[in-house]
Image (cartoon, rainbow, N blue to C red):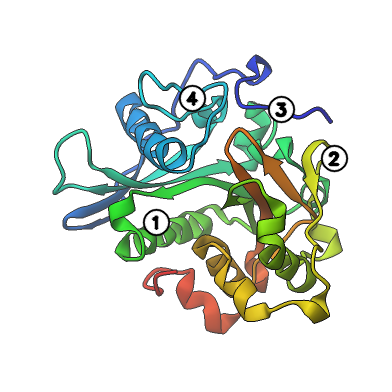
Amino acid sequence: MLQRRPGDRRYAEPQSPLPDSLTPMTSIAPFELAFAESAADLRAVQALRYQVFVNELGADGPMVDHAAGLERDAYDAHCRHLVLYDRSRPEGDQAVGAYRLLTGDAADAAGGFYSEAEYDLAPLKRSGRKLLELGRSCLHRDYRGGIGMHHLWNGLARFVEDEGIEILFGTASFHGTDATRLAAPLSLLHHRHLAPKALRPVARPESFQRMDLVPEDALDRRAAVLALPALIKAYLRLGGTVGEGAWIDRDFNTIDVCLVLDTAAVEAGRRGLYTRGGATP
C-alpha cells in the first residue's frame, strides 16, 4: 500500500467540514471540555497544534500553514476534536489541550485511518471490533503535568463508553529521528509490550525501524522506562501494547510507535486512570 500523506488530495476534505455539534462534556471553572463545534473552534485547535508540534518539536508537512500558524491536514474534517478550554485566558487563546478522534465509520469516509500511512492495520480491521483512532494529542506547555491531561482523558473515557468503542489505537511519538538514541525505550516496548499477534499492526516498509535494538538481557529497564514519553507510559499502565516496528516520520521529526489498547483487557485495578475521576496520567 502506498504511503498516504496528509496533503494527498485523494483524501480531500468533504463539503461539510465539521461533525455534529455536541454540548460541553465538563465545566469546572475555569476549564471547559467540549467538542469543536465551529470552524473557529477547529482553527483554535490547529493553532494550538502549531505551537506544540511545529514551534516546539520542529514538525512540518505539506498542509502546515506557517503564514497562518496552523497545523492541519485533510483528516481534520472527518474527526471529532476534543478540546480543553481555559476560559480565564484572553479570548481567542483559550484552547489549551486537544485530542483528535477518528471512528471507523468516519475513517471509511476519509479513505482510511490516518495511521495507515505508517502501519498495516489489517489485524485490527479483521478483528470485527469497534475501533477508535486517537491522534494529535497535545497540551499547551503551561498545562502539562497537571489537571489538563486529566480532563482530556475523562472526556475520552466518556466518548469511549457512549460509543461502545472496543479498541483504541494510534501513533505516539518520540522526539527526533535518531533510533540509536532511543534504543533502550524502543527495545523495552518490543520485548515487553508487543500487541497480541491477532491485533498487532506492523510498520510499513518504506520507513520501518526495528525496535529490538538491545537484547532483553542487556536492557537497563529502569533507564528505558524513564526515557518513555509520559503519554506512552500512561497507555502502558492501562495495559496498552505496541505494534511491530517503529516508523521514522521525518516531516514531523519523530519516531512513531503504534499503540493498541483493548478496552476489554484493561485491568480492573487500573480503570481509575481511564474512567471519570481517575488519576492524572
Query: Outermost residue toward the bottom?
Result: 269
Residue 265 in sight from this viewpoint: yes
State the residue position of label 2. 205
Query: Label 1 vs label 3: CA separation?
Result: 28 Å
How far apart marks 4 and 3 lie (CA) works out to: 16 Å
The tag earlier along the polypeptide, 1 or 3, is 3
Check disc 2 and give the amino acid type. Answer: Pro
In this figure, which residue is indicated by the disc labeled 3?
A: 4
Residue 37 or 52: which is nearer the viewer? 52
Q: Is residue 41 left or right of residue 172?
A: left
Mark 1 highlights which residue? 152
Could you tell me the amino acid type at mark 3? Arg
Instruction: Tell me the distance, in whole angstroms, between the alpha carbons under discs 2 and 3.
Output: 13 Å
Q: In terms of image quadrants, where is residue 49?
A: top left
- Amino acid type indicated by mark 1: Leu
Q: Is residue 90 left or right of residue 54?
A: left
Mark 2 residue crowding within 10 angstroms, few (<14) / some (14–19) / many (20+): some
Mark before the other along the chain sequence, 4 or 3: 3
What numbered label is drawn on residue 103?
Answer: none
Mark 2 to mark 4 CA distance (whole Å): 25 Å
| Cβ atoms at labels 2 and 3 below 8 Å apart | no
Kindly indicate whether the residue at mark 4 contacts the one at mark 2 (C-beta within 8 angstroms).
Answer: no
Callout 2 secondary element: helix
What's the residue type where badge 4 is placed? Val
Q: Position of residue 194 (x, y in %)?
A: 77, 66
Residue 108 on image: x %, y %: 68, 32
| Kind of element beneath mark 4 | loop
Q: Tell me which residue sits at (43%, 40%) in the image.
A: 81
Residue that mark 4 sits on: 64
N-terminal of the pair, mark 2 or mark 4, is 4
* CA neighbours of label 1 inside 10 A, class few (<14), some (14 to 19), many (20+): many
Labels 1 and 4: the sequence-earlier one: 4
